[in-house]
Amino acid sequence: MKKKYGVTLLASIWVFIFLIPLLGALYTALRTDNAISSGPFVWEFDSSFSHFKNAMGAAGYDFANFFKNSIIISIGTVFLTIFISFPASYAIVRLGFGGPWLLRLALALRITPAIFFVIPFYKLFTAYNLIDSPIALILADSFINMTLALLVFSGAINELPLEIEEAAAVDGASIWLTLRNIVLPLLGPGMAAVGVLTFLFSWSDYLFAVVLTSSEATPVTVGAANFVTSYGVRWGDISAAVCLSVLPPLVFATAAQKYLVKGLSSGAVKG
Amino acid sequence: MSVTFNKERKVAGWLLSAPLLLMLAALLIWPVYLGVKTSFTHDVLSEFATYGAGFENYKNLIHQPNFWLSLRFTLLYAFIATVAEVILGFALALLFDRVFPGKRVLFSLMLVPIMIAPSLMAVMYRLILNENIGIIPGFLQRIGINFSIFDQHNVFASLIVLDLLEFTAFTFLLSYSALQNMPSEIYEAAAIDGANARQVLTRVVLPMLKPAIAIIFLLRILDSIRTFDSVFILTGGGPGTTTQTVGIYIYKTAFIYGDFGLAASAAVVLVLLLAPFMPSIIKQFNLNQGGGK
């Protein structure tokens, strides 16, 4: 038994090391400005939580707006990605649509660096007047997440027993009915995996956000990074803003941890 | 039944794939065309006219030392970081591959870095590494170490360590999943044969997990090659251009210096350099997905 606590201790040390950045930000956000400027180890608890209040709008930052944008973009991307990938995965796996080529294309895309698409997307969305609109980021993020979603969905559909669908077909159910009443309800876990991964990755996007937005549609990632340069001395407010920014994906992904693990490993290693 | 059934399947296939096909047409085929076309165009923001320029951008690119330096930096950075992350991730997965008190909570906490956007992580790094208020320089000073983290000589190592802290969670998770998929009979058989823990690891576990580790390595290095957010926010590619990734080079060429043509040609070259690896990677994935079904 003694040995087992050794494992706990070793694992805790590594967890602590990995969490230093987050704990550091939280530590700074909870201290008073006075303590922050006096040195890194001066502790004076800011019981009024003024940095969090400032970040949420009291100090006139746009942060609340960035936050709203991130939520709109991430949720929009989740829905669009599922709408694109789920029916297509069924067509590819069960109806043999596109042979093996559509999935191969998806894999090739997974490998292509997103930076390649930055310039054409910028030109395309400028031409259609979508720069600095959440729609541009929803489209770009859905495009990037689509490949992982196709892999997760086609893997999940492949694992469903074919007999149920065959029985439904024999009973005269159309492909539509089978899809809606039989496949869809069985695909809950796959749906959850795609949902949590897509939410996480679109919330995390920085590259497309920095190119395709300027002020109106800016999400938290770009907003927080700009904070550092524009309000360089207000470390307390920046820390609070960053802590708030990581909260939604952290809560969501922790709640759906099982699906996160399943999705990430089925997109990579068969799990 | 079969004639109408087949026809229905065909129609359904097209209808169900329609959103995907539209997406591919609008955001893959058209942008690829635009990107390649831009790379053959003289397209500089400060000049009004854009015109076809043949291979002008590609010829210029060859003579841009910054492009080649950024390529070298990217590959070196990606390779070293990936090797370190695969090893550390696997070692931690081995540590977690047993029952111990507090495992559930610690496992969840191990995954936290995956849930934090790299750009937000970079902002936190800037906070804890800040010379005046950061806890890390403060701590180093206290124990009497004089170490300048983003100094020209240290910046490469610092970035690797930061990358390691951020992305090991990913290699850890995938290694752990792979270990969990090992059938327990194998351990039992090895134990009956009298193998000790080290022999089980080097002669049974590692050889069996070779394909999984290869995929984890591939996934991670491909993601590393695209590194943009964290390095851009931490160093902006500096000091000078010493930590400029290809992503940062392309971004700056287009959106800071306004030369879209040159940036597009760099992006095309990057994809062409990665293209030879695609078929083998696709094959690897398909094997793992039980593909061909």
Image (spheres, helix red, strand yellow):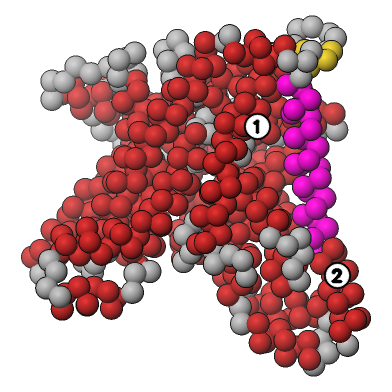
Picture residue at 10% right of the left edge, 69% below the top: A1
Left or right of A178 in this view: B83? left
Q: Position of residue B63 (x, y in %)?
A: 58, 9
Q: Chain of mark 1?
A: A
Q: Is residue B29 magenta?
A: yes
Q: Residue at x 59, y 13 (%)?
A: B62
The answer to whether residue A132 is left or right of residue A127 is left
Residue type, mark 1 in image: Phe
- Left or right, residue A131 beside residue A48: right
Q: Secondary structure at mark 1?
A: helix
Please tell me whether the stretch drawn in magenta is mainly helix, strand or loop: helix
Q: Is residue A145 left or right of residue B238?
A: right
User: What percent of the width, then of the height, locates residue B69?
Assistant: 47, 16
Of residues A190 and A169, the one nearer the viewer is A169
Q: Measured along the vertical axis of the image, is residue B18 above or below residue A42?
A: below
Query: Which residue is label 1 attached to?
Result: A116
A256 relative to B83, above or below: below
Image coordinates of residue B50 in percent, x first then y, are 83, 13
Distance between the alpha carbons at the discs numbered 1 and 2: 34 Å
- Residue A10 vs residue A85, the one in the foreground: A85
Tell me if label 1 and label 2 are in contact, CB under 8 Å: no
Q: Which residue is mark 2?
A: B10
Identify the residue at image location x=27%, y=42%.
A17
Q: Quadrant of residue B4?
A: bottom right
Q: Which residues are magenta?
A: B16-39
Furthest-bottom residue in this view? A171
Q: Residue B243: x and y, percent?
A: 43, 20
Q: Chain of mark 2?
A: B
Can residue B212 be spotted in the picture? yes
